[in-house]
Image (cartoon, rainbow, N blue to C red):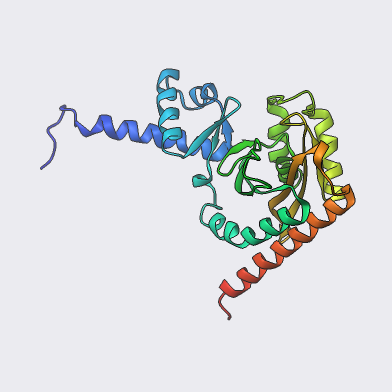
């Protein structure tokens, strides 16, 4: 039955709220990282309402707060379905890397302007590192994240450097220094950090390349004072593990591609 002219439809309020919520969701996905005030200015939604939508997005797992920025979670990434397969392929490689190096090994991927830890193989049960399984963090500090940032498209790098970011420790690099460090990482194919996110902790990370792009980072993390492998041996072990994972990924892709 048609609705009488001039009488409000009770569903209009719910529909309007849903539409505004979807606009917020789309803005977060498009920009990758955004503040509540930026949502307010871009969409003309009252700031108090924005905060309510932001709370719902975080509670539902579609966004996370990283140093004051609302960042789209992996649920809004094209890698949502691929990550479980990557974790499965990388699990034995992480274990082997941990055994060889005696350090905790970490697998991470980039989601928009953040790094997501997919899996960790701990060197010992009580070893708790700052970057834990399922956690997202900024791309500006730590070996796992810096590798991902170094191999990101230029718009992502510019976004991270131009926004400003939290200094986790006194060793966190400033934007101008970080820009040069990213060039060095791409040149050397490795990121080595000490104390950038946690004092006394060292990380050595390398990219996992496939199809000409960095699909993940592999990192060995441990206390710098207790690391027994030489730097060159550690880098060599990581690059060998990254190459092994690349072969596994490429092989899986070939098997899943139907022949013409």
Q: In this view, does 217 lie above or below 136?
A: below
Query: At which x and y percent is residue 149?
Result: 72, 42
Residue 87 versus residue 77: which sits nearer the camera? 87
Query: At which x and y percent is residue 200?
Result: 78, 31
Residue 90 versus residue 157: which sits nearer the camera? 90
Q: Which residue is drawn at 55% across and 26% down?
A: 35
Q: Quadrant of the N terminus?
A: top left
Q: Residue at x 88, y 48 (%)?
A: 230
Query: At which x and y percent is residue 34?
Result: 57, 30
Is residue 111 rendered to the left or right of residue 178? left
Q: Which residue is drawn at 47% across and 39% down?
A: 62
Q: In which quarter of the image is the C terminus?
A: bottom right
Query: At which x and y percent is residue 46?
Result: 42, 19
Q: Is residue 156 above or below residue 252?
A: above
Is residue 136 rendered to the left or right of residue 195? left
Q: In which quarter of the image is residue 156?
A: top right
Residue 100 versus residue 11: which sits nearer the camera? 100
Is residue 221 rendered to the left or right of residue 75? right
Q: Quadrant of residue 194?
A: top right
Residue 245 versus residue 95: which sits nearer the camera? 95
Q: Residue at x 22, y 34 (%)?
A: 11
Task: Please identify the residue farthest to the bottom as the structure is shown.
Answer: 260
């Amino acid at each position: 039955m048609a609705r009488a002219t001039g009488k409000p439809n009770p569903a209009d309020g719910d529909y309007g709220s849903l539409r505004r919520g979807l606009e917020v969701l789309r803005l977060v996905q498009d920009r990758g990282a955004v503040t509540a005030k930026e949502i307010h200015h871009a969409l003309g939604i009252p700031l108090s309402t924005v905060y309510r939508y932001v709370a719902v997005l975080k509670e539902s797992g579609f966004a996370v707060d990283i140093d004051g920025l609302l960042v789209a979670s992996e649920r809004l990434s094209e890698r949502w379905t691929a990550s479980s397969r990557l974790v499965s392929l990388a699990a034995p490689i992480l274990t082997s890397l941990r055994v060889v190096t005696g350090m905790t090994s970490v697998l991470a991927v980039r989601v928009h302007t953040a790094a997501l830890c997919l899996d960790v193989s701990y060197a010992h049960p009580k070893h708790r590192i700052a970057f834990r399984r399922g956690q997202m963090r900024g791309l500006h500090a730590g070996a796992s994240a810096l590798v991902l940032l170094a191999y990101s498209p230029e718009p992502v790098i510019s976004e991270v450097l131009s926004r400003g970011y939290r200094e986790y420790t006194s060793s966190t690099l400033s934007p101008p220094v970080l820009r040069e460090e990213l060039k060095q990482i791409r040149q050397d194919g490795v990121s080595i950090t000490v104390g950038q996110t946690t004092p006394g902790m060292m990380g050595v990370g390398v990219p996992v390349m496939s199809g000409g792009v960095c699909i993940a980072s592999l990192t060995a993390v441990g206390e710098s004072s207790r690391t027994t492998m030489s730097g060159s041996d550690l880098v060599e072990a990581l690059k060998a593990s990254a190459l092994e994972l690349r072969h596994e990924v490429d092989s899986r892709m070939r098997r899943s591609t139907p022949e013409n």
